[in-house]
Amino acid sequence: MVNDNLLDSVQAIFRSWFVDYDPFDGVCPSNWETGCVEDIAEFFDSMRKPLSSLERTDMERIYPYYGAVSIVDYVDDYIFDGEYLLVSEDGIYVVDENGHPLIQHISGKFWANNHAHILKGKSGFNEDSLYLFLANTNMAPIVTGAAQPKINQANLKSFPITIPDSETMLKFNNIIQPFFDQRLTNESEIKKLEALQSLLLTRLVD
């Protein structure tokens, strides 16, 4: 509930700045450019490594193992360490009812399979602002596959997006960062409790 309220707050700030253009007299500034997702996001998909359920069976449950939209399991090692966005690549759902991509915004040590694109912000975008720009973009047009919906990497990288100037992004990042920092802290505590619960349940079964 607390995290939902934090996200609602930053979503409202995003809409004010980049939908209604309130700080810019209601007009999109002329010095903003049209680019694509690859211009503002660095991809780490090549580092993903799926682990079968058999491979995970005897692992100590320490680090979260992420799939397309959530934690799938806990494993004894990690590939990534830091703040990243995981954008659903394929699965039952890859966008919501408004066509917005399903995104996990996470921080810490974790492993990820190959069902989510792994991104970090660049060119004036951090993970916070990148999250908001992607999460408010209708990407339904690039979803392929009927039985198995998919957003492939090439289509995601080339998706057009408006890129504000660096000064605007610096100011915006400074405003929203405290909200996201608190949100990530809250989620980290929740994950620790979930991991502990999972470990205790495993020991009870054994």
Image: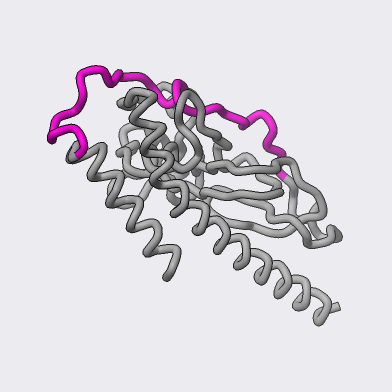
Q: Where is residue 191 shown, x and y percent of the image?
A: 63, 64
Q: Nearer the viewer, residue 92 or 206?
A: 206
> What span is in magenta?
23-50
Report the quarter where the C terminus lies.
Answer: bottom right
Q: Is residue 25 left or right of residue 70?
A: left
Residue visible at 40% across and 60% down? 6
Q: Is residue 169 left or right of residue 44?
A: left
* Residue furthest left as drawn: 26
Q: Nearer the viewer, residue 138 or 81?
A: 81
Q: Where is residue 184 shown, x and y percent of the image?
A: 55, 56
Report the quarter where the N terminus lies.
Answer: bottom left
Q: Where is residue 35 shown, x and y percent of the image?
A: 35, 19
Q: Quadrant of residue 197?
A: bottom right
Residue visible at 62% across and 66% down? 189
From what the image shows, is residue 73 above or below residue 175? below
* Residue furthest bottom as drawn: 204
Q: Is residue 178 left or right of residue 143?
A: right
Q: Nearer the viewer, residue 178 or 119?
A: 178
Residue visible at 50% across and 58% down? 183
Task: Check residue 175 for magenta coloring.
Answer: no
Q: How many numbered discs sit on the rendered protein?
A: 0
- The scheme the figure's colours follow is one colour
Residue visible at 77% across and 71% down? 199
Task: Check residue 39 for magenta coloring.
Answer: yes
